[in-house]
Image (cartoon, helix red, strand yellow):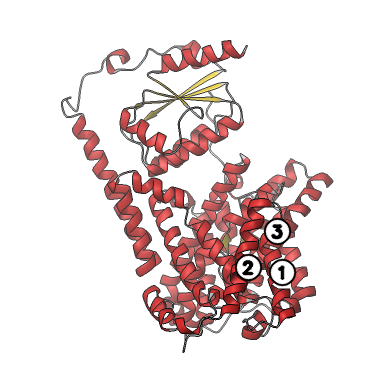
């Protein structure tokens, strides 16, 4: 098999928009992107304002972020389908920085974070973000979901807190408990109605814009019935009908140095979220994103967003998935989504004053519930004490301490867990000498090399060698993804794999899903019991994959399936 040449600088950093236009972009593609862009804008409209309010800034800041940041992400990013904007994952971080440093401090920290992301992208360091273990990602995402929900309790129940609502989790709960006697039943009713509309439409009319319908219906009801419920207008005075003039606040070197830790945290979280979102889009569409190009685009988008009064911008998983499902053909849909949001702000901004804050709180409650990834949490907790410890430590530190500290501790614990498992794998082999004379392959448990079978176009064999853990996942998936062929059967040999962790198993699940969509049967051969258990826990079981005792047995099963099909 001929090895592909290494990618050039142009290949790594050409925006996906340029690639799509080079491939040929016609009127049919544009029509599809118009529909997808409008669909995403309808979803993004209430979400952008809700996330901004939860982040401790005014709702118009969320719209500026989606319009300017979203436009630049689609224009310059390395993913075909990425939708940029304010993200729920940033709520905790933005609120903490605004409370501590003011909005000007957030603007400066975000601008520096954008420059950091551009530098990380051009230095080709984006690949290393993939080395963050899966339990760490799930842990801090679930922790953020807990904090988002806690931040919405006040508006869900219409509570009145004396003074400023604390940003820290425990003081926030104490303040909310002290204000419990101020519950507003009208706000509770509006929040309950909003949840009923969103969840009901998701179940019975999933293609309808449930978020926007909830906003319109509840806004009209509050206005028509004169309900005593806080709205965007009563708290913030409405939404402006134009973009602000670009500019940065005054700063000096000492202020910038002081904000460096916040800038690094924003850049780190933005890079993780954007690449996670791009991976989700890849899994749904079968395409591949350019990670370093995506980081460069995200960096420029963050600088552009705060220049026009926005906040942190990153790839948004829910809106990106909506974009793919709506039939997007490429980045043009993301650009159009920003255009539609701009049109709304220019034409219908006064109507935003009537949106109840209880409805926006209900929307973010649904966002937090979806972010928690309950199935992944339960799977990791059942996967063993090691990964459960990494997950719970990351989750707990995110909620009770600090996001940066949570990620750092989680990565260190993940590395220690890996070293421990490597030590166990070595101990199993201690009855062999570490250095032995060369022997024939068959004496080492490997089959004879057969050139005819190696060049079989119908059955492709790929051998893994060594532990399939979070650090090796990206490399193996990338190699397999570049094979370029679509065989009838794909055999993955685990004979030399001592263990598979949750990151590796989930990456393989995505790979198997891609092969299944192409009608390629997947066989796993020679997996030891512990490896097979880890794979099965990740959902890799028949009929998605077949297990065989050896490569020869897998080949025989593949040929038998071909014979039956014929």
Q: Are dots 2 and 3 in contact, CB under 8 Å?
A: no
The label on residue 209 is 3
Residue at image coords 62%, 82%: 230
Report x, y in % for residue 321.
62, 51
Is tag 1's residue or tag 3's residue first in the polypeptide sequence? 3
Say what secondary structure mark 2 lies in: helix
Res. 241 in view: no
Observer-nearest of 509 and 473: 509
Label 3, secondary structure: give it: loop
Residue position for label 2: 193
For the residue pair 550 and 358, the one nearer the viewer reads as 358
Q: Earlier in the sequence, mark 1 or mark 2?
A: 2
The quarter of the displayed image where residue 401 is located? bottom left
**Is there a contact, CB below 8 Å, between mark 1 and mark 2?**
yes
Query: Can you tell which of label 1 and label 2 is closer to the viewer?
Result: 2
Q: Is residue 288 above or below residue 300?
A: above
Above or below residue 53? Residue 234 is below
């Amino acid at each position: 098999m001929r090895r592909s040449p290494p990618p050039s600088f142009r290949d790594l950093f050409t925006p996906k928009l340029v690639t799509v236009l080079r491939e040929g972009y016609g009127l049919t593609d544009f029509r599809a992107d118009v529909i997808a862009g409008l669909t995403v804008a309808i979803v993004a409209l209430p979400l952008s304002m809700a996330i901004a309010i939860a982040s401790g800034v005014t709702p118009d800041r969320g719209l500026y972020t989606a319009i300017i940041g979203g436009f630049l992400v689609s224009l310059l990013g390395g993913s075909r389908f990425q939708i940029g904007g304010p993200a729920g994952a940033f709520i905790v971080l933005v609120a903490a920085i605004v409370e501590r440093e003011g909005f000007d401090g957030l603007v400066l920290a975000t601008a520096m974070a954008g420059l950091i992301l551009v530098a990380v992208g051009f230095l080709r360091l984006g690949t290393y973000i993939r080395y963050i273990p899966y339990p760490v990602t799930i842990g801090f995402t679930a922790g953020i979901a807990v904090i988002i929900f806690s931040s919405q309790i006040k508006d869900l129940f219409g509570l009145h807190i004396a003074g400023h609502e604390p940003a820290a989790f425990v003081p926030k709960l104490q303040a909310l408990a002290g204000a419990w006697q101020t519950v507003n039943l009208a706000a509770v009713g509006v929040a309950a109605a909003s949840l009923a509309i969103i969840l009901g439409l998701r179940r019975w009319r999933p293609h309808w814009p449930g978020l926007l319908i909830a906003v319109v219906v509840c806004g009209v009801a509050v206005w028509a019935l004169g309900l005593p419920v806080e709205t965007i207008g009563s708290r913030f005075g409405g939404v402006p009908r134009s973009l602000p003039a670009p500019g940065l606040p005054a700063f000096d070197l000492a202020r910038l140095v002081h904000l460096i830790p916040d800038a690094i945290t924003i850049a780190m979280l933005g890079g993780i979220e954007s690449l996670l979102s791009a991976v989700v889009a890849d899994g749904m569409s079968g395409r591949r994103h350019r990670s370093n190009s995506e980081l460069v685009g995200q960096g420029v988008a963050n600088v552009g967003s705060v220049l026009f009064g926005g906040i942190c911008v990153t790839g948004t998983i829910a809106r990106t998935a909506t974009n793919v499902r709506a039939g997007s053909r490429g980045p043009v849909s993301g650009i159009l989504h920003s255009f539609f949001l701009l049109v709304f702000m220019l034409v219908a901004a006064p109507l935003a004053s009537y949106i109840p804050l209880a409805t926006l709180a209900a929307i973010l409650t649904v966002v937090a519930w979806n972010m928690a990834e309950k199935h992944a949490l339960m799977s990791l907790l059942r996967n063993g004490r090691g990964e459960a410890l990494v997950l719970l430590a990351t989750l707990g530190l995110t909620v009770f301490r600090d996001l940066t500290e949570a990620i750092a501790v989680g990565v260190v614990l993940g590395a220690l867990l890996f070293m421990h498992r490597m030590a166990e794998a070595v101990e199993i082999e201690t009855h062999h000498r570490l250095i032995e004379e060369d022997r024939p392959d068959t004496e080492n448990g490997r089959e004879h090399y057969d050139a005819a079978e190696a060049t079989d176009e119908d059955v492709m064999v790929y051998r893994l060698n060594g532990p399939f853990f979070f650090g090796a996942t990206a490399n193996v998936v990338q190699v397999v993804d570049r094979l370029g062929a679509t065989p009838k059967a794909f055999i993955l040999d685990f004979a030399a794999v001592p263990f598979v962790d949750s990151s590796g198993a989930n990456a393989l699940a995505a790979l198997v899903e891609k092969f299944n969509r192409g009608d390629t049967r997947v066989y796993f051969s020679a997996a030891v019991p512990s490896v097979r258990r880890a794979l099965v826990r990740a959902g890799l079981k028949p009929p998605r994959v077949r297990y065989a005792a050896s490569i020869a047995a897998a080949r025989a099963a593949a040929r038998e399936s071909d014979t039956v099909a014929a």
